[in-house]
Image: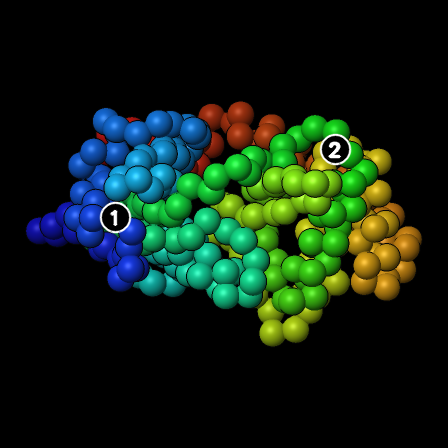
Amino acid sequence: MCKNTQTVFQIPEIPFSADFIPQIPSFFTERGTIIHNRRNQIRIFEENGQQINIKKYCIPPIVNRILYSLGWRTPKAKATYQNAVKILENGFLTPRPFGYILQRRAGLLNFSYFISEQIQNMRPMGYKKHSLALIHALAEYTADLHEKGMLHLDYTPNNILISEKNGKYSFALVDINRFRFYKGEVPMGAVLTNLMKPFREDEQIKLFVMEYVKRRGLDETLYKKVLQRRHLRNAYDNFKSKLKKIPLAKFFLNKPLGKQ
């Protein structure tokens, strides 16, 4: 009979009690402040004066559970930790990772947790109309990421944190379990897909891409290819949303948090 198991990893220089992380599953649903509650849940805790961000990942669909459990894919909590370390090593900002927990039931991955610092004085960029100054600042930042071979595969406004001081913007990346690192610059095919995501309105995307190509010395008509790819993606997403309404489709989707 397979037993339930728990794998815990945490950094050696953790700024709070070493017992805190292993005990998270026992108190997660009873304590903390919820800041995100959909398929996955994020709560903020305070321990020893340190604000801690804990993301609880829902139970994956059965195929992914098998792939994660066999080691053919890296569980999201572990991938997020590993990517955070690399992002910080490359000089970009993301919440400092403290560790992760992987729970298994009957040998298959169950819930998992990613533990990091809660960044202060930054907020998600969000889906709204932004100033030209912010658009240009993000274009410069994105060009720097791509030139250094760094690609956030879910580069959306809610995964880009911003702060502004004296007219200058700073950025941080979150929700980084899907991230790719290249030895050289990010390939142009991936660039096109990445550039279509940070803004909802076509006009803002055009301004963003025009500034991006200026920073990198690329063809200024690149924005046309980006918008074309965006429109195709929107059509695909609309088709996919209709598929989800088919009976039994939810069987193949991620389960809600539920009870352990």
Callout 2: helix, strand or loop? loop
- Most extreme residue toward the left is 1
The kind of residue on which mark 2 rests is: His
Say which quarter of the image contains residue 43.
Answer: top left
Q: Please state the horizontal and vertical placement of residue 145, each as a whole percent of the image.
A: 65, 60
Q: Residues within 10 Å of mark 2 (few under 14, many from 20)?
A: few
Q: Amino acid at mark 1?
A: Phe
Q: Which residue is mark 2?
A: 130
The location of residue 108, given as percent across then percent down, is 25, 51
Tell me how many marks there are.
2
In the rendered view, tell whether residue 102 sits above or below residue 34.
Answer: below
Q: Earlier in the sequence, mark 2 or mark 1?
A: 1
Q: Seen from this angle, which residue lies furthest front?
A: 166
Residue 149 position within the rendered picture, expressed as x and y whole percent measured from the top left: 63, 66
Q: Where residue 151 appears, x then y in whole percent? A: 61, 58
Q: Is residue 208 left or right of residue 73?
A: right
**Residue under the point 8% across and 51% down:** 1
Which residue is the site of mark 1? 16
